[in-house]
Image (cartoon, grey):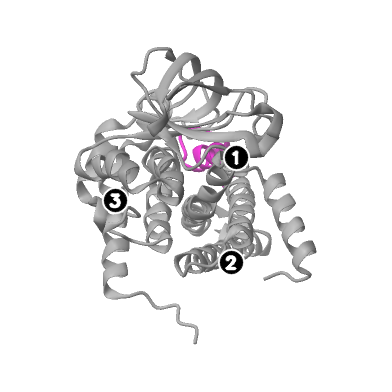
Amino acid sequence: MIDFSLSDEQKQLQDLAREFAQREVAPHAAHHDETGDFPMDIVKKAWELGLMNTHLPEAYGGLGLGVLEGCFIGEEIAAACSGIGTAMEANQLAEAPVLVGGSEEQKKKWLQPMAEQFRLAAYAVTEPGAGSDVMGIRTTARKVGSEYVINGSKMWITSAGVADWYFVLALSNPSRGARGMSAFIVPRETPGVEVGKKEKTMGQRASDTRGITFTDVVVPEENRIGAEGRGWFLAMKAFEHTRPVVAAAAVGLARAALEHSIRYANERRAFGHPIARQQAVAFMIADMARDVEAARLLTWRAAWHIDRGYPGILEAAYAKLFAADTAMRVTTDAVQIFGGYGYSREYPVEKLMRDAKVFQIYEGTSQIQRHIISMEVLSRGRSC
């Protein structure tokens, strides 16, 4: 049986996220886009309301909600500002590998405090020479007695400058490739950790994106997540839980662009009529609406799949790919509908178009999603 209705609790969560987004996020979106300031006060309010770390199990002080509930929150926040949404969602990506592969003691030490007090974390995997090619990382973790010494650099790390700790992927046995990668938690204040300058990005400027350098950083063996050599698996497994939420954020951004376009098309007059009555514009809006709905359905299906414990790599890739490409296409069309006004920073769709681009890049580029999809369907001989 297929049922698209939401429970009362899910509706309440969706309403809470929407109200918070419109009251606390939307009024400040332009400021953070202009200045690039990290929205610390907004993110803290979100944490206080229970809109962050929702996936943490109740045993560690969390709400124990599923990926689908995270998608409801992600869509609503991104409809107001996806940069602030990314600042809120970074915790989930850093925490996911610990949830997947951490010991009971590690979960209590690193995850429980995230629910008990306002803290931020970051997922530090990407490197200057290894973005989509995770197996090309060069950061090393050399074992010395009961400790590891980490050396290397990470790049494009979301929340690097504000995080309390990092999930770090490093080569503990370089000769074994992906099977020689191990995962570690590294507190930001550990000696030898150097955080770089905030990157001046095209969009989502509220998010804190920086490089990190590790120079002879010593962490105890107890900070290794999972067995030695399991790091790559944990880093990739985390994406099954986070990519649907990223897809939901792309849906929220595209939805906002669509809603702005509908209002503008009904108000703007040309040749004596609202431009919404021009078939060229009306059909463009129809295509935008179709793709937003389709992206949301793919996203919810991926979340549903994962929440029921099924392997979700293919479904997450479908959702991430289609939603990211939809966000870029819909915001580009929104700028076109607004015409010259759409190209002006005085109007909202210009920011949406800049913010949309990174959805095709982070948490696996659109090309990587196509690679995953092709590999999965070719090996399975089917698409689902």
Q: Residue furthest front?
A: 145
- Give the label, 2 or 3, closer to the camera: 3
Asked if residue 360 lies left or right of residue 22, the reply is right
Tell me: residue 304, above or below residue 320.
below
Circle 3: is it few (<14), some (14-19), or many (20+) Cα within 10 Å?
A: many
Query: Which residue shows up at 62% across the image and 56% down it?
Result: 317
Which residue is more in the foreground, 323 or 276?
323
- Amino acid on which disc 1 is placed: Lys
Query: Which residue shows up at 41% across the image and 44% down it?
Result: 98
The circle on residue 51 is 3
Range of residues picked out in magenta:
338-355
Residue at the disc numbered 1:
357
Find numbered disc 3 in the image and state the secondary structure of the residue it sits on. loop
Magenta stretch mostly in which secondary structure? helix
Which residue is more in the foreground, 275 or 183?
183
Of marks 3 and 1, which one's residue comes earlier in the chain?
3
The circle on residue 294 is 2
Question: Residue 341 magenta-drawn?
Answer: yes
